[in-house]
Amino acid sequence: MAYQYEYPRPALTVDCVVFGFDGDGLQVLLIRRGIEPFLGAWALPGGFVHMDEDLPEAARRELEEETGLHDVFLEQLATFGTPGRDPRGRVVSVAYVALVRPDQHPATGDTDASEAAWFPCGELPGLAFDHPLILEAALERLRGKIRYQPVGFELLPKRFTLSQIQALYEAILGRPIDKRNFRKKLLAFDFLVPLEEFTSGSHRPARLHRFDRRKYEALVRRGFLFEL
Amino acid sequence: MAYQYEYPRPALTVDCVVFGFDGDGLQVLLIRRGIEPFLGAWALPGGFVHMDEDLPEAARRELEEETGLHDVFLEQLATFGTPGRDPRGRVVSVAYVALVRPDQHPATGDTDASEAAWFPCGELPGLAFDHPLILEAALERLRGKIRYQPVGFELLPKRFTLSQIQALYEAILGRPIDKRNFRKKLLAFDFLVPLEEFTSGSHRPARLHRFDRRKYEALVRRGFLFEL
DNA sequence: TTGACTTAGTGTGAAAGTGACACTTACGTG
DNA sequence: CACGTAAGTGTCACTTTCACACTAAGTCAA
């Protein structure tokens, strides 16, 4: 008991909602808690903020420690601090949203101390603390974000087909999108580069594309709207 | 020195960016600090979070204590926690945006201990801590928010003219808007109720309107887009 | 080898929405 | 009663949106 303060202070944590896309549905990365409270329950990766680290740093550190993920897209979501949200006492948590590409995914369950696993957004297990609330807010944010900037950069592999990016949008928005209109609109932005490579598989090969990062970032700075 | 913890904890504060509209430009409510650090400097109203109160509660309490404002629209903005942002040590601050109507405005400088005053957004004094950063984020949020929901409800008096709401939009967006197109679009949403009352002054009287709260909220829930 | 299956890829036309634009109305003031 | 000032109002060209159906190219199995 080494730290004393004149007034009581809440504990401060960070939690991360990690979204991934497997080509079909949107997924969330959860960890199984190895300590009380909620021992054995699934929860968002996260933990206590150190005194000398910035908030995004703390989020990245916890993410790496608990899931092995690093160098991911990270964005602050909101802060949750209702008294009683943590049975250990007053704990305020700054929530982050992380987006990871398939090539960055850790193999499910391969981290040392804690167990981590991807869950489809629609089939989540019961979650510890107020994490269902945080997750709901994260989904809402993602649905909002996708309207004014393509999130494909962060969720798709470096090379992808137009069908993949459409499937991603359909997964996030939760409704089907017309193929021709979608492509027309997407290509009009001119930040996709068609490659001379094609998928191979059991059907007609699809042309691969990549993002033109410079054009995309220029557009984002100018502020653009991508409605569907 | 009554409170002891096994690990060190940051202090937790809330800060409020309070926007008002005086019919001409966008204003921000600031207080003059009565204690160190930054004694005598202008700053956002805010203060330490109590152990038993929720974050929005803390923001409302500090707002009332320091500016006399109550029952205002309040929305969480973001959390600022970079080490070194407060010279007293590690202090993490949850920032809120408040929108107040002119009829809720306190008279400038009328609170007891601290001095409060409205400043036009373009002519702000130097601010304490990282408050310039917070303010910039709040303005950005307001500009974003206005695109998908009219903020007039919270910033305009109960009865207002179409010219007033247009002036508000022009103040926030920082550019002129065509009068006819603006009215056409705004009225098409059908959440404004024309009243049989008119302004009086030295020109042609303008018809007053009010919001139809029910229709407005129904629209917000359905999600609508209000581009200009 | 060929036919069945599956996904990729492509254009048009009708309808709605956007944005530029100028004059008349109605009051207060001197 | 003339002037100043802000309120209020409609049209048209252009752009954007949305609905919609077939052909192309590969795999696989009989």
Image (cartoon, coloured by chain):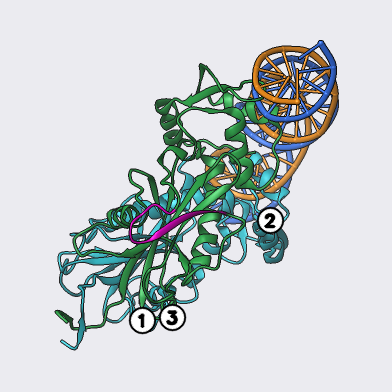
Chain colours: A cyan, B green, C orange, D blue
Identify the secondary structure beneath mark 3: loop
Tag 3: amino acid: Gly
Do the residues bearing badges 1 and 3 touch, measured as CB atoms within 8 Å? no
Left/right placement of residue A58 relative to residue A219 reads left
Q: Residue furthest bottom?
A: A2
Q: Position of residue B65 (x, y in %)?
A: 31, 56
The residue positioned 66% from the left and 59% from the top of the image is: A221
Residue closest to the eye, B6 or C22: C22
Left/right placement of residue B94 relative to residue A188 reads left
Do the residues bearing badges 1 and 2 touch, measured as CB atoms within 8 Å? no
Tag 2: amino acid: Arg
> Can residue B19 be seen?
yes
Q: Which residue is mark 1?
A: B89
Q: Which residue is mark 2?
A: A222
Q: Residues within 10 Å of mark 3 (few under 14, many from 20)?
A: some
Of marks 1 and 2, the one in the foreground? 1
Could you tell me which quadrant the C terminus of chain B lies in?
top right
Q: Residues within 10 Å of mark 1 (few under 14, many from 20)?
A: few
Q: Position of residue B189 (x, y in %)?
A: 54, 26
Could you tell me which quadrant the N terminus of chain B lies in?
bottom left
Q: Which residue is mark 3?
A: B84
In reply to whether residue B117 is colored magenta, the answer given is: yes
Residue closest to the eye, A46 or B97: B97
Which residues are drawn in magenta?
A: B109-120
Identify the secondary structure beneath mark 1: loop
Of marks 3 and 2, the one in the foreground? 3
| C-alpha separation, residue under disc 1 versus residue under disc 2 | 38 Å
Tag 1: amino acid: Gly
